[in-house]
Image (cartoon, rainbow, N blue to C red):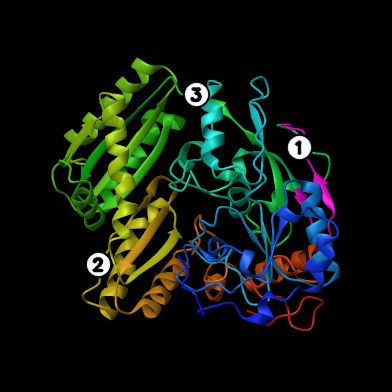
Amino acid sequence: MARETSSGPNPQETMPVPAFESLMRQLPAEALLIGDAIEPRFRETLSEVPAARPAFVMRPRNTREVSICLSTCDALHQPVAVQGGRTGFHGGERACPGEAILSLERMTDLAAVDVAGGSIEAQAGVPLQRVQEAAVDAGMYFGVDIGSRGSATIGGNVASNAGGIRVLRYGMFRAQVLGVEAVLADGTVLTSLKGLAKDNSGLDLNQLFIGSEGTLGVVTRACLKLHPRPAAETAAFCAVPSLAAAVKLLSRLRVALGPLLSAFELIFADAFEGALALRDTQRPVAAAPFYVLAELHALHAEHDIDVFAAALASAHEDGIVSDVTLAQSPREFAALWALRDACSEHLSTLDRLVACDISVQPARMETFVAEAGDSIRALDPTARFPVFGHLGDGNLHYIIQTDRPADVVDGVYRCVQRLGGSIAAEHGIGIDKKPYLHFSRSDAEIATMRRLKRAFDPNNILNPGRIFDAVAGGSAQGAVA
């Protein structure tokens, strides 16, 4: 929860502004909030940096109202911060001074599942969990799952290209999107909701909005791809003697199972012991330096599970796995995943944390962990590492408990840069990671991003200052990052 910056409202911040007055003539009363009517939740984010009091809040119910909001703000150069479920980690949804908030929380229409087409259409404010449940009710499956599934919204997932635990099998959110409807800064509505698996009729504009963090346009609806529901699912919790062994296990299971390997999670000892203590549960395997939770989504239940068990047994015989537990029931399956989820919950009990959401190629993960660890310990010998993440796709939530956060972050990102990785595997850049963007993107890439921003949002009203600052002297104001 963001800290309040003052004990009460500033009179200047609660006075009507031109954009608000214009919107009052065009929108229903319930779509607009100002002054004391703005609830504290609009300033509550997962970032520790305090949010500014918004100039006003817009709460449209449909695409037409979003278009009115943006065209009015654009005409009056009123900057806008876009909010969905406010579950981002790096301040992208955090209001900055002078910004209005565009909240999509009232846009919650969810269409029926198109079973023949394997798709479902959702407004931007629909929580991810509702899509998952609708898919299951129709005998299908949605490929993305994240811990904040009950709060994170489809619009935010599209804008951030959400990842999660099953990217190894189903891909990032980008792979789930068959089409989007988006509103540009000037109110122009672009609609591409045909639900087509193939459409090469010119440039794919959908992809520009996926992962753009609301800087190019506001996604109002999305047509999402659904998958066949697995015939069965099971998971194995493994103790492994080293990170190299974990990578070897990943390779073996990929060869044995192919695309049926749906998740491959790595947990460091510090995170695992904390999760065990938090849940007050028995350990599923013997103590080890590292642990792996591997999941199978079977197409042919008995055969595929037998292949999974045989591959695990072979890895155990060869010393790649020191101990293993294979879930024998849905209850055991849920219990193993509850331990993985408890790693995130454990973090809330700790202080002095630095969270680096990084990715490198799995083959380079051992090198990264060794080099980053050495760098951090040289700065802070008392640092601890409650790390976990998605080793299957090369993404670690590289979390450090330290008294030297700034130095540690710089050291970690420099290591990522040397290994050709990313400083933002699935959580995006937002505001807080902006100073480090150059560790993952070249000057030419950043300059191209700015050119796109100027083309789509020449007045720089949409999530200004997110990802990068606008070029000084251009039509969008701001300093070069």
- Front residue of 166/312: it is 166
Quadrant, the C terminus: bottom right
Query: From which residue to which does the magenta span run?
Result: 182-196
Q: Quadrant of the N terminus?
A: bottom left
Distance between the Cα atoms at labels 3 and 2? 40 Å
Question: Mark 1 highlights which residue?
Answer: 193
Disc 2: which residue: 384
Q: Nearer the viewer, mark 2 or mark 1?
A: 1
Residue 130: x and y in percent read 54, 36
In primary-sequence order, the first of circles 2 and 1 is 1
Q: Position of residue 40 (x, y in %)?
A: 54, 64
The residue positioned 44% from the left and 47% from the top of the image is 393
Identify the residue position indicated by label 3 in the image. Answer: 229
Q: Quadrant of residue 123 in the image?
A: top right
Q: Are marks 2 and 1 in contact (CB under 8 Å)?
A: no
The kind of secondary structure element at disc 2 is: loop
Residue nearest the observer in this picture, 80 or 258: 80
Horizontal arrangement in the rendering, residue 15 relative to residue 377 (left or right): right
Residue type of the residue flagged with mark 3: Arg
Q: Could you tell me if the residues under marks 1 and 3 are in contact, i.e. CB atoms within 8 Å?
A: no
User: Is residue 458 visible from the viewing direction of this image?
Assistant: no
Q: Is residue 201 above or below residue 459?
A: above
Which amino acid, mark 1?
Leu
Separation of residues labelled 2 and 1 (CA atoms): 47 Å
Q: Which badge, 3 or 2, is on the more N-terminal residue?
A: 3
